[in-house]
Image (cartoon, coloured by chain):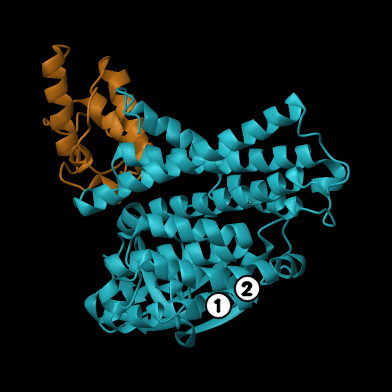
Amino acid sequence: MTRVDYESALTGVLEVARTHAEHVDREAMFPVKSVAALRTSGLMGMFVPREYGGLGDDLHAYIHIASRLAAACLSTAAVWTMHAFQVDGLTRFSGERLRERVLPAIAKGDIYIASVTTEAVKGADLFRAEAPLLSDDDEASFERSAPVVTGGRHADAFLITLRATPEAQPHEVSLVYAERNELRISEQGEWDPLGMRGTESVGLKISGSVPADQVVGQPGRFEDIARESMIPLAHVGWSACWLGAARGAFSDLLRWLRSPTRRGGPDIHSDLVRERIGRIRVELDLVSAYLTRLCDELTAARAEGRSWSDIHTRIRVNTLKLSASELTFKAADSMVQLAGMGGGYSKLAPIKLERHFRDLRSARLNHSNDRMWPATGALALLDPKVTLL
Amino acid sequence: MLNKPERSEWDEKFSTILRQVLPDFSPDVLIDPDQELRNLGLDSMKTVELLLGLESAYGAILFDDELDPRVFSTPRSLWTFVTERLDHDGTG
């Protein structure tokens, strides 16, 4: 799909996502109609190689689509983004037979993949798993609970982290691909959060058996998939989502501020108001520049066969996530302040800032910044030359 | 903890730091020089702790440049790196 093609595919999806965003948020329900539109658009084939009918791995297309979707409905954008980076992991690390079978179906929009990495005992630590995989020559079986599975009720397939064997250490993690019809799934817990309500991230108990070739990558080496694909693409994708949502909100705010028919609200001739507008603009531009620049770097590294897990890349990926999550929420907070009680704080306000504000509050909690700041500081200690992007 | 030096290949400071940072080394078993450190739970945060621990133990900055991740493959590769750096700095 060329840029023009995916632009036109996006246009239809955006209309659906925008139409249903408020309902999805109010009811805390999965954006079924938006995802149905994504399935028929061809955009679910992001990161599926072109020879299998997909969009290929153009990172700038990835952030463009994520960002545009997020301006319409951040929950829809997050669902698409998480599917997309799962697909990249699958494309790069699964065996030939699994690739041949599932990649064309993903590109057609027939398979939406959700991620199962959380676990009650170890929390959100991606690199640990407690529930073990039991394998013989032909089959791999498991039983596992996960407190948070975005889109868990609606996914057609899952990528699931498991301890490599019953004897393995918790850090020896394998990744398994399983389709819904191979699993027994029951729901646990309830879903009623402050924001990102449409992601419907329910808790699941999952058990099942899959053919042995559905173990993705080397057994026990999920870390390789995470470092070379999923983690960088997750942070890039989520950052694009947050930026897209904040940018969309800012665009609405500026149009409202300039509207000649607006009654009440801030005076755009005031220096204070203009300074606030200027600060929001600067914050969004800084995130945009870092996001785009990092995509250039990651694209070049992949093209040259360089790893994404060196210290510099990891610091930069973390830097993007930390700055995007903090600055986009700060921008949303400033927008609410600027628009005031009547303009931005209420669900009934002329511009819909409050949903973006609630959604963007999740950014610092999602892969928590409380863990990422010290981790980034520790990595920075390993780079005394201070090699900046 | 063992009471005598583990191997002639390295000194006791080295094995003490290894055991502090990677408690998965069984206290009753000699450290295998060719054991994969990542299989003992060496992640990026523990890599930092290992380096800082070694720098503190030997009173020297062990690296100031690109760090080859292969240094952290096994106790043997890490010890080779440490001794080379100490010889280079003249602090060993």
Q: How many tags in the picture?
A: 2
Residue bearing mark 1:
A37
Quadrant assignment for the C terminus of chain A: top left
Viewer-side residue, B55 vs A361: A361
**Same subunit: marks 2 and 1:** yes
User: Residue A139 appears at what percent x and percent y?
Assistant: 32, 83
For the residues marked 2 and 1, what is the alpha-carbon distance in whole angstroms? 7 Å
* Local crowd size for mark 1, using a 10 Å CA cut-off: few (<14), some (14–19), many (≥20): many
Mark identifier at residue A16: 2
Viewer-side residue, A358 vs A374: A358
Q: Residue at x 81, y 36 (%)?
A: A266
Q: Is mark 2 on a helix, strand or loop?
A: helix
Q: Is A240 above or below relative to B2?
A: below
Q: What residue type is labelled 1?
A: Ala
Q: Is mark 1 on a helix, strand or loop?
A: helix
Disc with the residue nearer the chain's start (2 vs 1): 2
**Dot 2: chain letter:** A
Q: Do the residues under discs 2 and 1 have CB atoms within 8 angstroms?
A: yes
The chain assigned the colour orange in the figure is B
